[in-house]
Amino acid sequence: MIKTDILIIGAGPTGLFAVFEAGLLKLKCHLIDALPQPGGQCSEIYPKKPIYDIPAYPEILAGDLTTKLLEQISSFQPGFTLGERAETIEKLEDNTFIVTTNKGTKHSAPIVAIAGGLGSFEPRKPPIPNIANFEDSGIEYIIRDPEMYRNKKVVIAGGGDSALDWAIFLTDVASEVSLVHRRNEFRGALDSVDKVQELKNAGKINMITPAEVKGILGDEKVTGVSIIKNGEEEIILEVDHFIPLFGLSPKLGPIANWGLDIEKNAIKVNNALDYQTNIPGIYAIGDVNTYPGKLKLILCGFHEATLMCQSAYKRIHPNKKYVMKYTTVGGVEGFDGSKKEAPKAVIKKIE
Amino acid sequence: MSDISIKITDRNGTLHEIQAPTDMAMNIMEIVKSYELAEEGTIGVCGGMAMCASCQCYVKSNHELPEMSPDEDLMLAEAFHVEDNSRLGCQIHITPALDGLEIELAPES
């Protein structure tokens, strides 16, 4: 069981900044995120895109914002459960919560802060009628264990970085790699496109473009796919695995069943006070919440995270006196023993 | 500047005739959001960067539209339910020339 003070669901910018504000109050945080890396949409959807409305940064790339937030919070030593989705929540008699992930990891905390953005990222599944019948018997939307493709015939569909990168990687593992895309052009990084070109020329990747996988063949397991190439007859390709890599789209997911008041796919919170939900001890901050006048902006998420932490502190320490301290005055004392503070003024006497 | 009129068929098949301002630098995705014609969180997921295809729509009228950028074209190449008249709503800016435009929202995917 992982124990912490504030359990944050979602490791996007709002969740990450909450670690800093909690740290100033000596509260420890642990974050759960369905993605394998922190940063949320900033790292998953648009790492190379600039953001222009982060105060004091005239321009910052979304990926750099994530890097800087991680640097800012590192001395508060947050814990991470990555690549797992928060599935269930249970409130115990002592008012603490147990949150369990889809992989069974259990977390215990007196405060839960949902910073889940638009939800957890789920793979986008192509609308092929019988595709659901083959999930985990030849269809994989996410590559978890590349070894399962050893000496197998694999077809990948998609035009972004993950399709290119996995096609490249699997040439060393699978016996046959085909890549199907509806265009001859790819969205991925230029180096990857060049590498795939090289592997195609060397006969290691069978490129089928512009084309689309339209059907899946097999009884219990995938034995092949049918592919339609622009203006041509259907091609049947014998394969053991079909890996559609069409990116991820966020879904609110299991959080929708936690008994929270939900409106327009977002969690209703008390914005007059502390961004608490209808369940005391559970807060919702950033894009995942809603209230009159809500704006889904990173900078608003930072503010909400700050107020949430103050309220969380009062819940955890109801009888302790506390006043907010400016970091310029109080410095930043990390849980790792580090201390950052304003340098003392140099005083010099005039003789 | 005056508003223009646009006909939008939502994902349930209901037709809405709405007024869209031409002076607010808005696009079709944003108009759909502002009139709440698609459920929050199911459209404009990437915010309008042509990076998610959640605002895919079918253009039903013969209006001359801005040319597709390579970003939009490649995003549509990975979208589902794509037809010859598919566009990303976030890449179509509202201009007076689009008065009378008719579009239908593509299914959620």
Image (spheres, coloured by chain):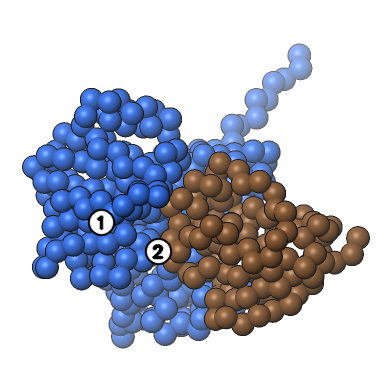
**In the rendered image, which quarter is residue A51 located in?**
top right
Residue B65 lies, in percent from the top left, at 70, 53
| Parent chain of label 1 | A
The local crowd at label 2, few if under 14, some if 14 to 19, many if 20 or more residues have their Cα within 10 Å, is many
Residue A233 lies, in percent from the top left, at 31, 52
- The chain coloured blue in the image: A
Along the line of sight, the residue nearer the viewer: A34 or A327? A34
Q: Colour of chain B?
A: brown
Secondary structure type for disc 1: strand
Q: Residue beneath label 1, please?
A: A226
Residue B107 lies, in percent from the top left, at 49, 70
Measure how far apart labels 2 and 1 are at the Cα level: 31 Å
- Give the amino acid type for the residue marked by disc 2 in the picture: Ser
- Give the amino acid type for the residue marked by disc 1 in the picture: Ser
Q: Quadrant of the C terminus of chain A?
A: top right
Q: Residue beneath label 2, please?
A: A120
| Parent chain of label 2 | A
Along the line of sight, the residue nearer the viewer: A224 or A119? A224
Q: Residue at x 80, y 64 (%)?
A: B99
Residue A57 versus residue A2 in the image, above or below: above
